[in-house]
Amino acid sequence: MNIVLLFILVGVLLCWITITILGGLGRVHRLMYDSHTPPETLDLHPDQPPSADSSLPLPSVTIIVPGRNEGHVLLDTLGSICRQDYPNCRVIFIDDQSTDNTAKIAGQLAAQFLHLHILHNTQPPPPGWMGKNWAIHQARQWADTEYLLFVDSDMHFHPQCLRQAMRLVRHRNLDLLSILPRPQGNSVMEQGFLMVAMTAMFTMAAPHRSNNPASKAILTAGAFLLFRRHTYEAIGGHEAIKGQLIEDLALGGRAKNRGFRVFTVLTRELLFGRMYEGVVDTFRGGKKNVYAGLKYNPLAALALALGFLFVGALLPIYPVVAASLVLLKPATLAWVNLTLAVVANALALVHMRRVRRFLDGTPGSEFILSPAVIFCLVILGASVRDYYTGGNIWSGRTYSRKTMAHPDEAIQ
């Protein structure tokens, strides 16, 4: 028993060391970009391009905001987008067949902000299109500015968000800038899900690796995608990824694979918002995305499930088992196992506390790591099941295996 436990604990400890290095916040903090961050202080890749002339006038930008049944937050979120301290921008909000008061709230804001234009999508997406991609594609036809910014309608924007983003775009001569927002969770389980999801995401595709042109990793967020218009057109726009459920990674991947400069940063204050409204909504949203994020690869799903199980869900069980073996027979190997179990738990706790602090989560929520991982394991299982048995229902639309394109098709 001690030998089996030793092999498991060595593997678990190595996994947490890897997570701390790859998915930790050490290098991530060097990519933190807020309202007063000088662009030149960020973690830059050696192929630093020449900086653009900052004395030139700020380029024109169209902000495209799709929204479906977001009336409960739209007054604050779309309002914050309209209040950007930027001299040459227009905002296009497209109401994507909402059944709540979204259209009414958008109309109130349009009466207040003259640069806000409202479009109404009254038709369901054509065959082969995801709803969000279809809505954005319609709005895009009304934008002819030098830059296009695609954002989510449930995000809160700092007044300096667009101006600060453009500073970085011009400093690094970027073709696509993505800002990862600070996600918020009201309940402890929401926060636990976010901590686990962020850890997994950064371990598989950390921002500094995504920013490296030599790496195949890509991490871009639909909450903020600032494109040069000619770059967006060169990669085919949303029409090229019309069947992609996770359109942000698809767009970022197409741009990076075609040699365009793609850069991703994190922020604590420029952009933030609550992704899901409670535990049930978190479950629904998570199972819509997680298997798609794994490119519908059953082996990747199995590997992630085993990782969740052995590296997270069973983590608090290991010290109990090891301590029991010490009590039964206090051999050297039993004490080694107990030490490894304690160190693995301590390392996991330190890591999750750092993630919790980054998210401004409730103090102590890092202690629910095991229940949160079990919750994520259930979400993963449901996501795989739904893909093969009919599809997910999200915002009143069904996303099935027949209607969704495979992620690998996005880079062709």
Image (cartoon, helix red, strand yellow):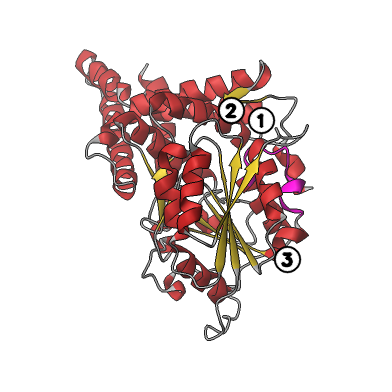
- Examine the rendering and report whether any part of residue 266 can be seen: no
Task: Find out whether the residues at labels 1 and 2 contact each other: C-beta distance under 8 Å.
Answer: yes
Residue at which label 1 appears: 297
- Examine the rendering and report whether any part of residue 406 can be seen: yes
The residue type indicated by label 2 comes to Ala
Crowding at dot 2, Cα within 10 Å, few <14 / some 14-19 / many 20+, comes out as many
Q: Is residue 156 magenta?
A: no
Task: Find out whether the residues at labels 3 and 2 contact each other: C-beta distance under 8 Å.
Answer: no
In the image, what residue occupies the spot 52% across and 47% down? 152
Crowding at dot 3, Cα within 10 Å, few <14 / some 14-19 / many 20+, comes out as some
- Whole-percent x and y of residue 400? 68, 24
- In this rendering, is residue 7 above or below 177? above
SS of the residue at dot 3?
A: helix
User: Is residue 124 left or right of 66 when viewed as pictured?
Assistant: right
User: Is residue 354 left or right of 376 when viewed as pictured?
Assistant: left
The residue type indicated by label 3 comes to His
In the image, what residue occupies the spot 66% across and 43% down? 135
In the image, what residue occupies the spot 52% across and 83% down? 54
SS of the residue at dot 2?
A: helix
Task: Find out whether the residues at labels 1 and 3 contact each other: C-beta distance under 8 Å.
Answer: no
Image quarter of residue 407: top right
Closer to us: 368 or 20: 368
Q: Which mark is residue 301?
A: 2
The residue type indicated by label 1 comes to Asn
Q: Tell me which numbered mark, 1 or 3, is placed earlier along the sequence.
A: 3
Q: Which residues are magenta?
A: 236-247
Image quarter of residue 235: bottom right
- Whole-percent x and y of residue 180? 48, 52
Q: Which mark is residue 230?
A: 3
Closer to us: 112 or 241: 112
SS of the residue at dot 1?
A: loop
